[in-house]
Every structure is written in structure tokens, then in C-alpha cells.
Image (cartoon, rainbow, N blue to C red):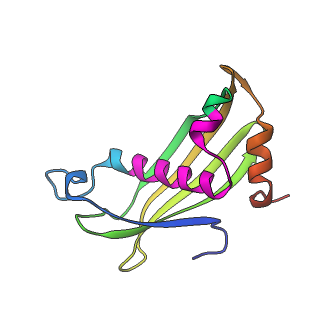
Amino acid sequence: MNKKYIFETRMQVRDYECDIEGIVNNANYLHYTEHTRHLFLKQCGLSFAEMHKKGIDAVVARMTLQFKTPLQCDDEFYSRLYLEKEGIKYVFYQDIYRASDEKLSFRGKIELVCLINGRLGRSEEYDKAFEKYLQP
């Protein structure tokens, strides 16, 4: 794993995620990246559900997506991420690699912001949980 990545998980393509062409439907990459972010949050000691109960919701503000080498049924893959902070935004750089040959399948830049009781703001909880992963 490239040392810029701070988290990775391994997953497998399920048959129902593929379209008639036999490749993963583009929308499923968003599911893969979201699942990866949620696992990363758990590693950081944060529960998405508990944060919501406190009135703190991290929501997607913008996505830039690049589809590279398609994944197919039963392919195993690595979903990797690293994180930067730009103002009040948390920017997740997420890449998916086919496990068999490490070919890049997907690249995404996902920008999240926090809503505190419905209003855009800074979250001390997220800042504290992510501080060791953010470069000075």
C-alpha cells in the first residue's frame, strides 16, 4: 500500500452489482467508497449514528469521479483512502484497485462538510478524530 493512504479495506464484487455488460455499475463505486469511509470512521472511534444523535452530520458536498479499469463479478479489490482538510471541508481521496493485479479501477475525490443541528459548521469531534491523519 502506498504510504499516502491511511486506510484500506478489501471487498469483493457481488453479482447483483454488475450491469448487462458484466461490469460493476458505476453507482456501486459510491457504495464502496461510502462503506470505506464508514469503516475508517469506526477506526477513528466515531460512530456515524452516534454523531447524528448529537446533531452532527457529515454530508457529501461534492464528488469528482474517474472510472478507470472496470471491475467484474467476483473480483476482489482494495478500497483505499487518504484525507486532507480544506477550510471546513474534509476531502477524502479514495482509490479502488483490483486485487489480482493492482490496476486502478476508480478514483474519487469526495468533499464532506458538517452540519451541526442543521447548520454548516466545524465539528470538534471530527477534527479531533482525524488530527493524527491530517498533514500539518
Q: Residue at x 77, y 56 (%)?
A: 134
Residue extending furthest right? 136
Q: Going by the image, does 78 lie left or right of 70?
A: right
Residue 86 visible (yes or no): no
Residue extending furthest left? 20
Residue 132 falls inside the magenta stretch: no
Residue extending furthest bottom? 101
Q: Residue at x 29, y 69 (%)?
A: 75
Magenta residues (range): 29-51
Residue 38 visible (yes or no): yes
Q: Quadrant of the C terminus?
A: bottom right
Q: Residue at x 80, y 39 (%)?
A: 124
Residue extending furthest top? 118
| Number of numbered discs visible in the structure rendering | 0
Query: Which image quadrant is residue 123 in?
Result: top right
Residue 49: x, y in percent?
57, 37
Residue 99: x, y in percent?
39, 75
Q: Going by the image, does 41 lie left or right of 119?
A: left
Query: Which image quadrant is residue 12 in?
Result: bottom left
Task: In the rendered view, tell whether residue 61 sits above or below residue 97.
Answer: above
Task: In the rendered view, tell whether residue 107 sits above or below residue 78.
Answer: above
Q: Quadrant of the N terminus?
A: bottom right
Majority secondary structure in the magenta region: helix
Q: Going by the image, does 1 lie left or right of 100?
A: right
Residue 130: x, y in percent?
74, 52
Residue 113: x, y in percent?
66, 34
